[in-house]
Amino acid sequence: MTDVNQLITEHLDIWTSAIEKKSSAGRGNGGAFSLYGIKKLRELILELAVRGKLVPQDEEEGTAEKLLKELGRGKAELAAKGEIKTPRQIEHRKTPKRHPVPSGWLWVHIDQVGAVVGGGTPKASDPKSFKEPGDGFPWLTPADLSGNTELYVERGSRDLSESGLAKSSATRMPANTVLFTSRAPIGYVAISAGPIATNQGFKSVVPFHVEMSKYIALVLRCFAPEIDAAAPGTTFKEVSGKIVAGLSFPLPPLAEQHRIVAKADELMALCDALEGQAEDSLKAHQTLVETCLATLTNSQTPEALTHNWTRIEAQFDTLFTTEESVEALRRAVLDLALRGLLTEQISGETPASDLLRKLYDKNKKSASSRHRTIVSKTKKAEPPFDLPESWAWSNLGLLSSDLRYGTSKKCDRDDKLVPVLRIPNVSGGRVDLDDMKFGPLDPKEVEDLRLRSNDLLIIRSNGSLDIVGSFAVVPELEGDFAFAGYLVRVRIDPAFVDPRYIWYVSRSRFIRDQIEGPIRHGVGLKNVNSTELASLQFPIPPREEQERIVDKLDDLFEICDRLAQRVDDSNTINFTLADTLTSKIN
């Protein structure tokens, strides 16, 4: 038998250090990670339980064969009392064996240990069908179990009236019924603390022996991911009562079930404690990183910045050990860059105000009437913070001579047509020509939408808030390339403003806040329009300093890339170790 305590306690560092970053959108970092190792440990505990490896077997506790006969009698008694429908005569079925089990166990079907019961919902148009919680008969929907951490539940957010219960297919089920959600989503498990009914989103199990509830719940929790994966359907998956009834079920003697449940509860409590410690440690680490980076970004002079950077650089190995901490370093570096603290200001360089005056005059002569209309609608805003004396504020519309949406024509794989860059080609922040499509553009469209080196492309519409407003700089391209309608092209004269500088600043929290503000509460596709993009405020340094900032950011982001790769390599190792430990049960 696997030494469970040794397997767990000797590898606590692996269980707690395997941390997975969650996908996120928009501002805020709450819940940005999940404890992958502890999740795998919970799965391991459940798997050991259903394989008979969590506790030793005791011959004096009887056999599953004897228990199965008791379950048959229990089924008949429940049917006689009317607590379950008279069961159908079960035809002879071969029970698939998922894995080996101890000699005293049996593989049976779930409907041999309990009655599988569905649910129902009365007409929502009849308000008399429902009651406030506590005023009617307890009734549950899958939504009521969302976020539930308790094993036992009493009722949901609404009760059914007697008439509502009678007019629907909802079934009265006794206390200790094992509740299993069969759709939206599949796999929530709980036990009823008293008599209860459910809607049609459940395939619940009424145990033929009341003392089996906790073990049945444990088995369903273990098998839930597999049941979900095997469920038919794509956009709306659902498990039928027939599928649940036919699931293979590992049946140990009743006394061993009690010991398995007790041991599993003990180990899950350990997981809870490890999870709390790991989360506290991550929060403390995040606070330390934020404090150190705040010291960095609060530097008032390049000299102070150099001093503070040196102090932090000496602690890189302990500070930047997570994806979030590395991203925080990138944000801090960008914050320093856009406030003029990353590089030295050199006297004698043409001030940004003079530079912009010349650029504005040039753009007025070349800009289309449409572009001038967009610029005229840009929002005026007060400078959000002070800049170095040689810098100036400008918005994106004034910096550009052309701000234009792409083609709305449908593109396909016919490479005899004009290549069209789409969101997949720029969503990584750089132009990628791997997944190209082509469009039937007429000569005027080709002329209007032709991309030049140093053009900026911005994603203006997407389902992900993170992607909307992302910038990419167009490199030197061979031939004519156009761009799709969900993109906006911004053309800035690189003699005045380095597009690479604009690209870097566009990744800062300062710009992201401006982009996300108007669309934060949208649903479905998130959009920014041309006027909102034209209104984005950018701090502009002298032209020579722009290049120095870009060079400095290139160097610092390369350091961040190396740190991120180290974190990724470490995570890969930790994930592999956690998976390897889990596989020891085979």
Image (cartoon, rainbow, N blue to C red):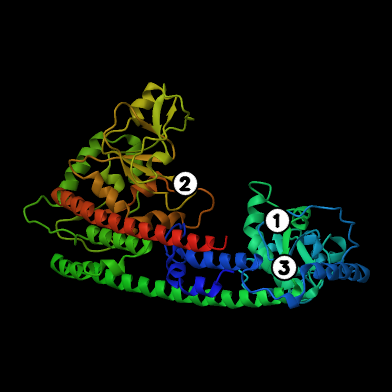
Element at label 2: strand
Give the distance between the C-alpha atoms of the residues marked 3 and 1, in whole angstroms. 17 Å
Residue 3 image-quadrant placement:
bottom right
Image x and y of residue 108, in percent: 77, 60
Q: Which residue is mark 1?
A: 97
- Of labels 1 and 2, earlier in sequence is 1
Horizontal side of residue 555 vs 46, given as left or right: left
Image x and y of residue 230, in percent: 66, 50
How many other residues sit within 10 Å of disc 3, few (<14), some (14-19) or many (≥20)? Answer: many
- Of labels 3 and 2, earlier in sequence is 3
Q: Nearer the viewer, mark 3 or mark 2?
A: 3
Check whether the beta carbons of the residues at disc 1 and disc 2 lie within 8 A of each other.
Answer: no
Q: Nearer the viewer, mark 1 or mark 2?
A: 1
Question: Disc 2 residue type?
Answer: Asn
Which residue appears farthest toward the left when viewing the image? 348
Element at label 3: helix
Instruction: Relative to 24, say whether 137 is above or below.
Output: below
Residue pictured at 48% horizontal, 28% vertical: 412
Question: Disc 1 residue type?
Answer: Lys
Q: Which residue is mark 3?
A: 216
Instruction: Relative to 468, say whether 421 is above or below.
Output: above
Q: Which residue is mark 2?
A: 462
From the viewer's side, name the closer residue of 383 and 313. 313
Q: Is residue 395 visible?
A: no
Image x and y of residue 332, in percent: 28, 63
Check whether the beta carbons of the residues at disc 3 and disc 2 lie within 8 A of each other.
Answer: no
Give the distance between the C-alpha atoms of the residues marked 1 and 2, in whole angstroms. 47 Å
Residue pictured at 75% horizontal, 60% vertical: 203
Question: Disc 3 residue type?
Answer: Ile
